[in-house]
Image (cartoon, grey):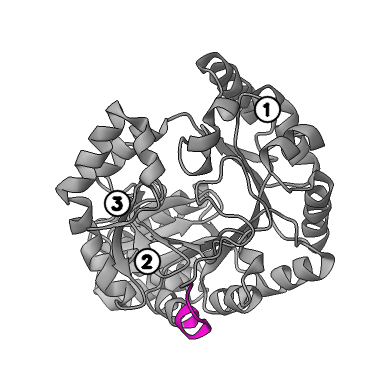
Amino acid sequence: MTQITGVTPLPGSSIPVSTPATTTSGMLRAPLYVAWQVTNECNLACMHCIEESGPGKAFKDELSKEQVFDVLRQIAENDVPYLSFSGGEPMLHPYFFEMVEYACSHGTQVKVETNAHYLSPEACARLKAAGVKAVQVSLDGANPESFGRMRVRGNFHQVIEGLHNLHEAGVPIEINHSPTGFNAHEIANMVDLSAEVGADSFYTGRTMYTGNAVKTWAKLNATDEQYEQFFATLREKTEQYRGRMRIHFHEMGLLEELQYRLHHPAALLIVLPNGLVKLINALPFVCGDLRRQSLTEIWAHFQQAWQDPRVAAFVHALEQDPGKTAMLHQWISV
Amino acid sequence: MQLGKYVKFREEKFGGVLFETQSEKVYTLNPTAAAIIRELGSGCDATELTQRLADRFQAPMDTIERDVAALIADLRQKGLVEDARS
């Protein structure tokens, strides 16, 4: 019998236990995580939206119902353990609940990333019945003022009501928070509010200079001093809530993260509303098209695509010109 | 005994992976550990599991018991297994 070595992180990871985002993907037969932006349509028009989503912003060529369910079938057949639905606002997708129910019933753990404006008691009950792993709600302010400044057209009270409905239905809640110059000082209140609404996890990190944030950076950008205090508070809160709510935060900036990824591609595929598959959200590179290729074919090409010299060149160019992230949606096939 | 509610197992050429989706942590398993997890999927207890592996690998029971106990202790400590829900 082979000696059991137990559970260990994948080779190549520099941290004791890896995550899908930091797991070396080359050894795996399929991705561990598919992050699917199911539509670019959104009821809000947030100042920092990486996808530049908003009302009337659905792509003209978003996947048809038949194509959507073909992708879901492939995800199930490839035994992809984890799938997130985001957008835009995923709950605006015409087949949202059917997609969630299909994925959950085929053994995939599903996370829904939403702005929480459509979380009625009935919707939450249906998500609970489907068996979603969690619903992640974006909450970028601890009060209506800072929330409304960031989440244009958003309604803070509606989000809190949606969170209440999730909690009542027994759906696990995760909160995602983007810091800015005008809300970073609220981080202690943000964490406390997340615990009050019954969140199991709280996620945050530096807001990225991508998407809408490129245009609004002067209003958004938090200073180094603000971030220093922000992360110090998070470290204190992590201890305070240990055993009650998990607090996850990453201090790495976008450039550092992309430099790391060049050598450690994540075990993660980003699927766009039209079926194109990106190497990583914050780069314009596309490594496949689910309308024309299978998930297996795209995964087989994924590692090679990361080695395309244009990818490294783009990341190196970002060191000199961070504004190149404005080209995020001008896709380049690799 | 069974995998935790939020733990997914997938077999790979090198053995397998366990993905704990709540903490979003990934663990790799060598072929033997993967074989144990596969047996765990049937919901059997440690004794049954050891017997099945002994039959399968034609190995001494005490060696297998030691290996299984060590792995299960590690899995329990990491919150990756739980007692079977009735």
Nearer the viewer's eye, disc 1 or disc 3?
Answer: 1
In this figure, which residue is indicated by the disc labeled 2?
A276
Residue A5 disc label: 3
Question: In the figure, A127 relative to A309: above or below?
Answer: below
Q: Residues within 10 Å of mark 2 (few under 14, many from 20)?
A: many
Q: Are marks 1 and 3 in contact (CB under 8 Å)?
A: no
Part of the protein shown in magenta: A62-69
User: Looking at the picture, how far across and down is residue A281, in whole percent?
Assistant: 41, 50
| Mark 2: amino acid | Leu
Q: Residues within 10 Å of mark 3 (few under 14, many from 20)?
A: some
Give the quadrant of the C terminus of chain A. bottom left
Q: Secondary structure at mark 2?
A: strand
The chain carrying label 1 is A
Nearest to the observer: residue A8 or residue A176: A176
Alpha-carbon span between mark 3 and mark 2 = 39 Å
Q: To which quarter of the image does residue A31 belong?
A: bottom left
Residue at position x 55%, y 26% in the image: A218
In the image, residue A68 lies in the stretch drawn in magenta: yes
Furthest toward the bottom, the residue is: A66
Nearest to the observer: residue A298 or residue A24: A298
Question: In the figure, A3 relative to A300: above or below?
Answer: above
Alpha-carbon span between mark 1 and mark 2 = 34 Å
Q: Are marks 3 and 2 in contact (CB under 8 Å)?
A: no
Furthest toward the top, the residue is: A225
User: Looking at the picture, how far across and down is residue A293, in whole percent?
Assistant: 29, 76
In this figure, which residue is indicated by the disc labeled 1?
A183
Alpha-carbon span between mark 1 and mark 3 = 46 Å
